[in-house]
Amino acid sequence: MAGVATTVPSARLLLDERIARHRADLLAFVRRRVRRDAEEIAQETWVRVVRADPDCPDEASFRAYAYTVARRLIIDHVRSSARALPLVPLEGGMHPQPASSGDPAQMMQAGQALAVVQEELRHMKPEIAEVFRLRMTTGLSFKEIAARQGCSLNTALGRHHQATRRLARVLRAKGLGPEDPDGM
């Protein structure tokens, strides 16, 4: 019995020491991938690691385990952030609809995002902004947009890609869009 009592505290002590050694690096890892909620994600990582009490024989396997937990939490966070922002129709055709939850903070954030998108579209080349507007407000296919603009299908696709990447970057910079999943 005495051997069991001393084994449990020493295993717990080893886990605490490992967490202490990796805490700052893991937090930096999470912060590089998500700006908001990084501390909470890192803390949840350590809670899950403690609950799992992984049987990792060396530091490298412990670190890999902890980072895998963190990576999965980051992915969940990015996915939930993407779902949290309602899609807001842009200029023309459709009228903005309130978020289904009726959450005032969510509706305010959607309104701010719409204002940022509309402003950024004004600063884009007209043909790029037009592809984005047509696609988002009319639901035209890229083939139809290409025909309307008198360009190839690949050009229309490229213009839409340019617009969406730029808008996503600006929205992230203003804290209104989901974190960049490519940063993982």
Image: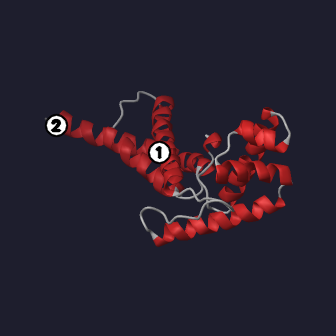
Q: Is residue 114 left or right of residue 64?
A: right
Alpha-carbon distance for marks 1 and 2? 43 Å
Percent coordinates x, y for residue 184 in the rendering: 61, 40
Foreground pick, 98 / 71: 98
Specify the quadrant of the image occupied by residue 147. top right
Q: Residue at x 67, y 63 (%)?
A: 174
Kindly indicate the quadrant of the structure image that contains residue 145: top right
Q: Which mark is residue 92?
A: none
What amino acid is found at the position of numbered circle 2 in the picture?
Answer: Ala
Q: How is the image coloured?
A: secondary structure
Position of 80 with respect to 87 (left or right) is left
Crowding around mark 2 (Cα neighbors within 10 Å: few <14, some 14 to 19, many 20+) is few
| 90 relative to 157 in the view: left or right | left
Tell me which residue sits at (41%, 27%) in the image: 57
Q: Which residue is denoted by mark 1 in the rendering?
A: 76
> In the image, residue 12 lies at what x, y percent?
32, 42
Relative to 144, is 179 on the left or the right? left
Residue 3 is situated, as x and y percent measured from the top left of the image, at 20, 33
Q: Residue furthest top?
A: 57
User: In terms of depth relative to the viewer, which is nearer, 70 or 54?
Assistant: 70
Q: Which of the two discs, 1 and 2, sits closer to the camera? A: 1
- Residue at the spot 80% in from the left edge and 44% down from the top edge: 148
Q: In the displayed image of the protein, which residue is found farthest to the left?
A: 1
Amino acid at circle 1: Asp
Instruction: From this view, report whether residue 57 is shown above or below residue 115.
Output: above
Label annotation for residue 2? 2
